[in-house]
Each structure stands twice: as C-alpha cells, then as structure tokens.
Image (spheres, rainbow, N blue to C red):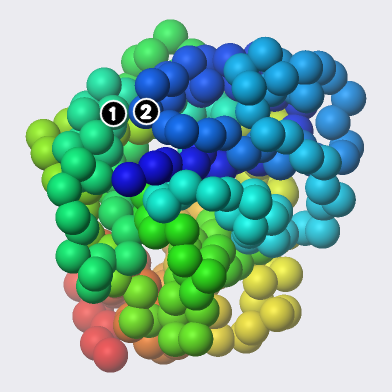
Amino acid sequence: MTVSLCTIARDETRFLPGLLESVHGVVDEIILGIDDRTTDGTAEVAGLYGARAFSFEWHDSFAEARNLTIDRARGDWILVLDPDERLLPNGRLALRDTLAVAVPLEIDGYHTLIVETDLDDNELSAPEVSSSRLFRNAPDLRYMGRVHEEVRYVPDPPRTYCEMLPGLREPHIQHYGLDATIWEQRCKRARDRRLLHMRLRDNPDDAVAYCYLALMARKEGRRMAAKVFAKRALACGPRTLHDDRVVQMRDLAGMFHGECFTV
C-alpha cells in the first residue's frame, strides 16, 4: 500500500522540516498546499524534501484547503499531518504494520492518539484521540467543516467508519501548536471562534461546531455558555459526534447542581 502525506502550510519554515523528517521512509509522496498569503521560504523547504507543492487561495475553510491536497494525491492511503506535528516512532510502527496487511473494506480510516506538548516536549495534557488522520484515498471521503474539519463519507457523513490505529496505547502524533507562545502568536482562539460561527451560518444544525464552542467556553471559564453550547450540540444529534465527544457534551450540559441532560 502506498501512502501520500497531505499537508497545508502558511509561513512554516520553522516547523516544516521537522514534520517532513518525521515521515521519511514512511510515505511515498508529499503533497503540500501552500497558502498564497505565505511570505517566507516554505516553498523552498518543500523543494528540498521532494514535496509536490502548489499554491492555493484561502477561503476561510480548512476543509476546502485540505481537499485540494487530497485531490492531487496518488497513494492508496492518505496521511494528514500539519507542519507543527510530528509522526512519533509508535505512529510509524503502527502505520507500517496496519497497511502491511489487507485492511477490511468497511474501514474508511483510523483515529490516532495525539499528545500536545510545548516546544520543549513537555506534555501539556494527557494524550487524546484525534479525528481520522489515516484514511483511504477514495473520491467519496473528503473533509467537511471550515475548522475542526473531519473526514466524512460524502453522501452520508454519519456512515463514515473509522477505527483506532492498532498497536501500543502510546501517542502516534506529537503536536506543538498549543504551546502558549505559538497559540498566541497565531491568534488561533480568535480564528477558530470566527470560523466556528461561520460553520453555524453554513449549517445551523452543526453539532460539531456547537461542540467545539462548548469546549472553548469551558476552557475560558464561561460555564453557562459551555452548558448552552453543549445542549445545542446534543440537540443536533449525537450521531454526528464521536462517542467521546458525546460524553463530554453530556457532562457539560449537566454541569450545574448535578443536573442531567438526556437525548
């Protein structure tokens, strides 16, 4: 099975080499979409690693940008990582072993375990399950959502079936993006909030958008807002959320006075 790394970048000369080195020997090709607002040498770095790079115009949608890279991929499987992420040794091993044998046809892709760290590699939180980062290169599997985008089966998104990447219960991916200096420099909180509200304008019943707004509100200490957003996420239908997110939303929705919320 051949694997295409698909990534997008804007001004990523600092982090891109580390990403590309982490996947060396694991992927068969590198597809890199470069945001046309880029002003540094990202394209030159991509060339040094043999990436097939192209420029794209940003339209306030990570899903749209990622799908442009997938459209250009030639591998049997797609691996999606960002420049500020690294494929860890356990991820390399799990990916290799999983694709060394025939994957059951009902499996569209695999969730991975991701660990958030600061720039000194200190863990910021316990590893968490990510959205599918390894999935089949199929025309009916595409990203959906302007931000916190996820791979979905296009005709019927809830039909998408992904399993956990087999192997040791150790992180597959390391992410530097939540380091305090990086997070503030890139104004990610304001960007994500704006794009989540744009998602809701696109689809007022977007459970995922409400879910992430609830999680943001919780992190900011806005407990009432977290509760309201969590209830709205569940009212849209838990079928559109990962099981772990359903549990989180139920906890947030009933976080006052032992209140419970059922759907």
**Residue at 46%, 58% in the rendered image:** 137
Residue bearing mark 2:
26
Mark 1 element type: helix
Q: Which disc number belongs to residue 131?
A: none
Mark 2 element type: loop
Can residue 219 be seen in this snapshot?
A: no
Q: Amino acid at mark 1?
A: Arg
Q: Position of residue 78 (x, y in %)?
A: 45, 49
Q: Which disc number belongs to residue 92?
A: 1
Q: Position of residue 11 (x, y in %)?
A: 76, 26
Relative to 243, residue 115 above or below = above
**Residue at 20%, 58% in the rendered image:** 103
- Residue lying farthest to the left in this orientation: 168
- Real-space CA distance between mark 1 and mark 2, rounded to the nearest whole angstrom: 7 Å
Q: In this image, 9 relative to 257: left or right?
A: right
Sort mark 2 into few (<14), some (14-19) or many (20+) by Cα contacts within 10 Å: some
Total numbered labels: 2
Q: Position of residue 86 (x, y in %)?
A: 43, 25
Q: Give the quadrant of residue 124.
A: top left
Q: Amino acid at mark 2?
A: Val
